[in-house]
Amino acid sequence: MRTGAQFYTIKDYCKTLDGLSESLARVADIGYTTVQLSGVCAYDPEWMAQELKKNGLTCVLTHTKGPRMIEAPEQVCRNHKIFGCRNIGLSSMPNFDFSEESYQNFVNSYHKVAEIFVQEGCKLYFHNHADTFARLPDGKQLFERILEDFSPELLNITLDTYWVQFAGGDPAAWLRKLAGRVECIHLKDMCMVGKEQHMAPVGWGNMNFDAILSAAEDAGSQYLLVEQDLCYGEDPFVCLKKSYDYLKSVGLQ
């Protein structure tokens, strides 16, 4: 398994091409060799291919806007393949209101996207949040319905272990349940600040990463992507380094 940096962590530094270029270099300097592109400015895929190569980085996943996937799925795949990425992620469910009609619209739209991605040699990834574990009108968890309606051949899961725990689930159990379709996962820690739950660098909170990392290996995860959405005033590059150093200390790079 390899560690990677999810660029949503440093999104505020990636609003321009100059900032994105500098951020790629800074992440490489920390020691990361893989990245997920998310929350960054628009870029030309040829430019990105050159920047990744220059910094010795591989992009293993993106978060791409859902409407763009629906409008031009073939072009989305072609652009990704230019910079060597075949995993295309959906970060959330756009305009979803938890009604049955809304759910069916989601399935109809993204089932077609997923089928075209496979034909183009790419793969759609779905990223969970805490509300993915909410129940739909039929009483089933939203996550369970998604897994029923999208086969492993069409959809992989970017399991965000923090949001699983936040929702009251067991991240290690979910990783094992999703074995074979969790090649890329998200890691961040959870700590308490007074009476409030906060996000923290991996290894700096209270989540059971011994169990999570063991389950990730059993489930066939290949890329452990550090995503700390909130850093609470701390430099996000420092947070990425803290996570990197912890994961390195347990034998991962």
Image: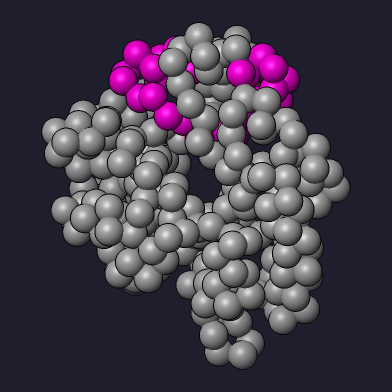
| Relative horizontal placement of residue 52, taking residue 80 as reference (left or right) | left
| Relative horizontal placement of residue 240, taking residue 146 as reference (left or right) | left
Up-down: is 18 above or below 243? Answer: above
Number of marks present in the image shown:
0
One can see residue 67 in this view: no
The residue shown at (77%, 78%) is 101
Membership of 34 in magenta stretch = yes
The residue shown at (40%, 20%) is 27
- Give residue 31's position: percent from left, percent from top: 31, 20
- Give residue 96's position: percent from left, percent from top: 70, 66
Membership of 134 in magenta stretch = no
Up-down: is 252 above or below 131? Answer: above
- Nearer-the-camera pick, 251 or 5: 251
The residue shown at (47%, 59%) is 181
- Give residue 176's position: percent from left, percent from top: 33, 66
- Nearer-the-camera pick, 195 or 199: 199
Colour style of the rendered protein structure: one colour
Please report the bounds of the magenta region as a residue range.
Answer: 22-49
Residue 241 figure quarter: top left
| Relative horizontal placement of residue 33, taking residue 54 as reference (left or right) | left
| Residue lying farthest to the right in this orientation | 71
Quarter of the image where the C terminus is located: top left
| Relative horizontal placement of residue 154, taking residue 171 as reference (left or right) | right
Up-down: is 133 above or below 137? Answer: above
- Give residue 239's position: percent from left, percent from top: 31, 30
Residue 42 figure quarter: top right
